[in-house]
Image (cartoon, helix red, strand yellow):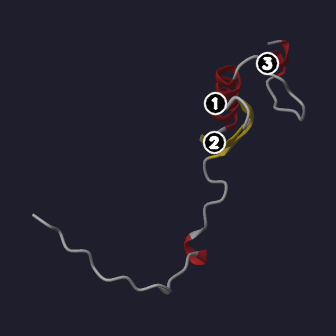
Amino acid sequence: MAELDKGVPQVGMIFKTREEAWLFWCAYGGRVGFDVRKRYANKSPMDSKVTSCRYVCAKEGVRKKGQRETIQKLFRPESTKLL
């Protein structure tokens, strides 16, 4: 928990629990002024425990309006609702 006193994320930080790391990231994002989200979590195949996870800015990986695909590449038939 001593790492939390610094207030700025650094490479190699270690937390006791994932919840502690998530709270640190949420607090940091709130202080700096951006929303946060969980990107992924790697689990051990042996015991399914989380070995690492990545927290990012909520807009990381989101395309801007001008960069979105405007042409639909795969046309799918409209689905019909069965009653």
Please indicate whether residue 8 sits to the left or right of residue 81 in the image: right
User: Residue 45: x and y, percent?
Assistant: 72, 38
Q: Residue furthest top?
A: 2
* Mark 2 in CB contact with mark 1 (< 8 angstroms): no
Looking at the image, residue 66 lies above or below residue 11: below
Label 2 sits on a secondary structure element that is loop
* Mark 2 in CB contact with mark 3 (< 8 angstroms): no
Tell which of 34 and 79 is nearer to you: 79
Label number found at residue 4:
3
Residue at (71% x, 19% y) in the render: 17
Quarter of the image where one finds residue 47: top right
User: How far apart are labels 2 and 1 at the CA level?
Assistant: 9 Å
First reached walking from the N terminus: tag 2 or tag 3: 3
User: Residue 82: x and y, percent?
Assistant: 14, 67
Tell me the mark number nearer the camera, choosing from 2 and 3. Answer: 3
User: How far apart are labels 3 and 1 at the CA level?
Assistant: 12 Å
Residue that mark 2 sits on: 34
Going by the numbered disc 1, the residue's amino acid type is Cys
Label 3: how many residues lie within 10 Å, few (<14), some (14-19) or many (20+)? some
Q: Residue furthest left?
A: 83
Residue at (79% x, 24% y) in the render: 7
Q: Quadrant of the C terminus?
A: bottom left
Looking at the image, residue 8 lies above or below residue 39: above
Label number found at residue 26:
1
Tell which of 6 and 11 is nearer to you: 11
Label 1 sits on a secondary structure element that is helix
Label 1: how many residues lie within 10 Å, few (<14), some (14-19) or many (20+)? some
Going by the numbered disc 3, the residue's amino acid type is Leu
